[in-house]
Image: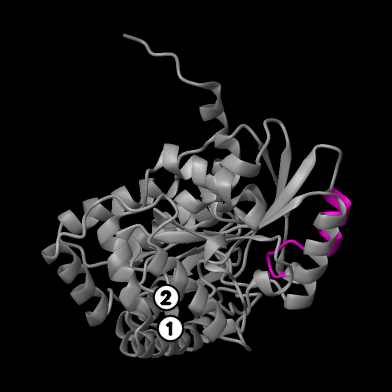
Amino acid sequence: MQHHLASRLDHISSFHVMELMKMAAELEAEGRHLIHMGIGEPDFTAPTDVIAAATAAMAEGKLQYTSALGLPALRSAISSHYRDQFGLDVPAQRIIVTAGASAALLLACAALVEAGKEVLMPDPSYPCNRHFVAAFEGRARLIPSGPAERFQLSAQMVREHWGAQTAGVLLASPSNPTGTSIPQSELREIIDIVKQRGGYTIVDEIYQGLSYEGAPFSALSLDSDVVVINSFSKYFNMTGWRLGWLVVPESIVPAVEKLAQNLFICASAVAQHAALACFTPDSLAVYAARKEEFRRRRDYLVPALRELGLDVPVTPDGAFYVYADCSRFSDDADAFAKQVLREAGVVIVPGKDFGPATAHRYVRLSYANSLENLQEAVRRLKTFLHPEKS
């Protein structure tokens, strides 16, 4: 039987990188040893306190549905985290615990995106962000952004591209795939421009804890009306636990709660009880040490790639990604990534998924892998790119 699919699917692309991952799996099945620099996932797992809290929650039978807004204790803990880390007063009643940052973005788009309206975002950007907009029949308008803008939207770009059908902007700082952040003064100006035009600003801050230059800040410090997405996946190393949160203006909490009740019921109860232990002194010390390890890896990898001839025009200041220009070696980043996989045994991601502006020139490399493995990857890349020197 042929089923008729909704037309909105025409505006949602597949992850092209999955083809590369299938190729990698086939090579590994043949016995090849690969260095993985493609996955956007910490190589660390949850600390001891978090595992113990999950075990205790299961042993004590704390497995029932929670409020759609999340455990009150966890919402309060996140509120305290904003106070302790950023000096911000973010009331717990504005915090909604979600089934990962993906659910937070889904709820934000369900509440704010109107059919046919535009949402501005940079090209390159994480593909799911534009697909959430498309899922609610909005139109993601990708604005090409290069090294001069740190691969981010600038205030001037927002001014120039805001039109009659524009309703808001969706930003990520630090960003996937580039690891770059929007400077505080620039972000403030963007928020002001959007607010003057009656629009909304959504800021994905899931890599906020992994900021390496200067004091990290939240967009919430610039304007309390900003909608902010965050997650326990990246900084807190809980990817498979599927837990995140959303901060919204208090006036729209009832609307988002209604959506959460209907779309998700609640986030995982076990994951929520476990996440309470993310904020213990021991866990916070673990996260701080792991952040420094990510910084150490970045400080090794960026100059190493530049020495190989893979240009890194903007040093990433956050997350665990490097966005590198491979045009010295190929005018087709997708073909280049596949050749690197087959011949060098290193998994990297082409820019194809992140938008057309950088698709052919750039590849993304993740340093969410051990320093030893990163050093081996660089050795393999050197042999592949410069066989005459090997």
Q: Residue furthest left?
A: 59
| Image x and y of residue 266, in percent | 37, 49
- Residue 236 appears left or right of 84: left
Residue where numbered disc 2 is placed: 367
| Image x and y of residue 158, in percent | 82, 56
- Between 61 and 382, the one lying in front of the other is 61
Residue where numbered disc 1 is placed: 294
What kind of residue is marked 1?
Phe
Please say if the residues under marks 1 and 2 sit with CB atoms less than 8 Å apart.
Answer: yes
- In what element is the residue under mark 2? loop
Segment tinted magenta in the rendering = 150-161
- Between 244 and 17, the one lying in front of the other is 244
Above or below, comparing residue 189 to residue 87 in the picture: above
| Image x and y of residue 369, in percent | 34, 76
* Foreground tag (1 vs 2): 1
Q: Residue furthest top?
A: 1
One can see residue 209 in this view: no
One can see residue 337 in this view: yes
Residue displayed at 42% across by 88% down: 288
The quarter of the rendered structure image containing the N terminus is top left
Disc count in the image? Answer: 2
What kind of residue is marked 2?
Tyr
Residue displayed at 38% across by 62% down: 39
Above or below, comparing residue 180 to residue 293 in the picture: above
State which quadrant residue 176 falls in. bottom right
Above or below, comparing residue 205 to residue 137 in the picture: below
